[in-house]
């Protein structure tokens, strides 16, 4: 048998049916398929969806770092496509790849979400967490997803933006429609666009008013932010607020729910460690972002032919990097399928754009890295850790209400969104 025949025989033995990516089993538990991808098809050509799947840790790292060979942009900046015209958020940074416009959009705003600028908003985070917990702390039980995680990040962002408090509930409704609109289902898209338009009509007079009389709020800061003598225009400001509420709010919502799911059901034996030492919430966040991160994939477009293993990814191909698969790569992490807040082979502290750390340990891939590294990485961590610390401190003896739980899953493929449990019922000793 020739070498090529042998290769084909081997492949068929461990063949992947690309329709597996669309099954409810995969939405719930993608990890067995990830394992087969890593072991037998590290550069998998999915002919059915017309894309390539990359699943090993260091290959994903290489895709993120190599901006010569890959771009996130689907369209060229100087081509005929009108940016924002087909996106549920309107004009926003997520549509841009490696060009000048991305650099500008990122740099004009990135500083608002880290360091002292972020610390300025700590009292807001604190206030919202306490307010929400106060509403149920006498009840002895809570459905954490609807009563806390769906509410908390969106109310924090709305307050940071300086929006009137009585209008917060509208934002809670809008952002869920916006996120669903990121999916493939036409109905979700229509509802997402309707929510966006309503939100924009609401925001425009506020933006005009803050232009005239700026305050210390985030909306005023975004309006005034300037780079190379240029500010964002009205459409870009509205698009950025939509992105902030949806991509920033929903991801953090799901992060908190996932952290609590793992503490209650995956590793309840480690929960007492966290209660005894609340600093360990940082580890819970980090290990959640490795073990089963909120976002499992990111897309790139190949700008040249890329040889990888025994394949060649053609120029123009869509490449999906599976962050959730890279994070379970046994070439990098010991016992990768074990959730362990004390693991010593993962960088546990704050993430950075380079993905390289002084402790020499690999980080999780859950915020991406390189050119498009998550701009809200510090904010998401701070919110998730603070909220969890308050929950554990203000509610006594928290435990799951039900012994069984159906677990975390991705949304159906027609709707956008991130991985999380649908519900999380907890009981505690009433205050
Ligand atoms: C746990 C919560 C979060 C997760 C899991 C998450 C995940 C990610 C990932 C994986 C990327 C990389 C995209 C790529 O490589 O193409 C990204 C980018 C981004 N994130 Fe987040 N994110 C979170 C929270 C936030 C928050 C709170 C904000 C709001 C400030 C935010 C704003 C952004 C923006 C603007 C980008 C695009 C950056 C660019 O293209 O340069 N994210 N996020």
Image (cartoon, grey):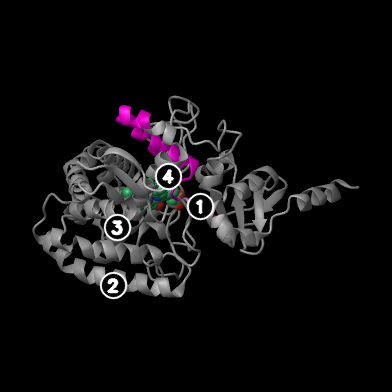
Q: Residue at point 37% right, 67% down?
A: 88
Magenta stretch: give its range.
Answer: 272-301
Among the two numbered marks 3 and 2 on one chain, the one whose residue lies closer to the N terminus:
2
In this image, 368 relative to 375: left or right? Answer: right
Disc 4 C-beta below 8 A from ligand 1: yes
Does the residue tagged 2 have its C-beta within 8 Å of any atom of ligand 1? Answer: no
Judge by depth and name the residue closer to the eye, 213 or 315: 213
Q: First in sequence: mark 3 or mark 1?
A: 3
Q: Is residue 151 left or right of residue 186?
A: left
Q: Earlier in the sequence, mark 3 or mark 4?
A: 3
Which numbered circle lies on residue 245? 3
Res 8 label: none
Tag 1–tag 4 contact (CB < 8 Å): no
Give me the C-alpha separation between circle 4 and circle 2.
Answer: 29 Å
Secondary-structure class at tag 2? helix
Q: Is residue 42 visible?
A: no
Distance of label 1 from label 4 (alpha carbons)? 10 Å
Identify the residue under disc 1.
Answer: 297
Residue on which the image places disc 2: 197
Q: CA distance from mark 3 to mark 1?
A: 20 Å
Pointer 3 local density, CA inside 10 Å: few below 14, some 14–19, many at least 20: many
Helix, strand or loop for disc 1: strand
Residue 281 lies in the magenta stretch:
yes
Q: Which residue is mark 4?
A: 367
Nearest to N terminus: mark 1 or mark 4 = 1
Q: Secondary structure at mark 4?
A: loop
Crowdedness of circle 4 by 10 Å Cα count: few (<14), some, many (20+)? many
């Amino acid at each position: 048998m020739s070498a090529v025949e042998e290769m084909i025989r081997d492949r068929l033995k461990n063949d992947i049916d690309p329709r597996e990516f669309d099954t409810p089993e995969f939405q719930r538990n993608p990890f067995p398929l990830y394992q087969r991808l890593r072991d037998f098809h590290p550069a998998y050509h999915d002919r059915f969806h017309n894309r390539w799947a990359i699943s090993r840790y260091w290959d994903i790292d290489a895709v993120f770092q190599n901006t010569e060979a890959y771009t996130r942009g689907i369209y060229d900046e100087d081509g005929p496509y009108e940016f924002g015209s087909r996106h549920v958020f309107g004009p926003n940074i997520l549509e841009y790849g490696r060009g000048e416009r991305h650099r500008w959009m990122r740099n004009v705003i990135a500083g608002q979400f880290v360091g002292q600028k972020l610390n300025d908003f700590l009292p807001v985070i604190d206030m919202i967490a306490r307010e929400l917990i106060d509403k149920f702390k006498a009840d002895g039980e809570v459905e954490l997803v609807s009563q806390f995680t769906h509410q908390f990040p969106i109310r924090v962002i709305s307050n940071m933006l300086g929006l009137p408090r009585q209008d917060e509930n509208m934002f809670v409704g809008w952002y869920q429609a916006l996120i669903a609109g990121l999916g493939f289902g036409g109905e979700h898209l229509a509802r997402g666009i309707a929510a966006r338009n309503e939100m924009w009509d609401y925001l425009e007079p506020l933006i005009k008013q803050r232009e005239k009389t700026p305050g210390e709020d985030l909306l005023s800061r975004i309006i005034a932010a300037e780079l190379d003598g240029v500010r964002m225009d009205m459409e870009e400001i509205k698009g950025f607020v939509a992105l902030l509420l949806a991509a920033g709010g929903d991801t953090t919502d799901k992060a908190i729910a996932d952290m609590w799911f793992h503490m209650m059901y995956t590793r309840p034996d480690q929960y007492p460690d966290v209660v005894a030492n609340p600093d360990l919430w940082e580890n819970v966040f980090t290990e959640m972002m490795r073990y089963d991160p909120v976002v499992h994939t990111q897309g790139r477009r190949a700008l040249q032919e890329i040889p990888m293993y025994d394949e060649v990814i053609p120029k123009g191909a869509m490449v999906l990097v599976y962050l959730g698969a890279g994070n379970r790569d046994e070439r990098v992490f010991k016992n990768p399928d074990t959730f362990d807040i004390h693991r010593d082979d993962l960088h546990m502290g704050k993430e950075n754009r380079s993905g390289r750390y002084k402790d020499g340990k690999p980080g999780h891939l859950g915020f991406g890295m390189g050119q498009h590294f998550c701009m809200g990485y510090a904010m998401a961590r701070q919110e998730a850790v603070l909220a969890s610390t308050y929950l554990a401190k203000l509610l006594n003896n928290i435990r799951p209400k039900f012994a069984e739980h159906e677990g975390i899953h991705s949304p159906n493929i027609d709707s956008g969104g991130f991985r999380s449990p649908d519900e999380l019922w907890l009981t505690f000793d009433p205050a």
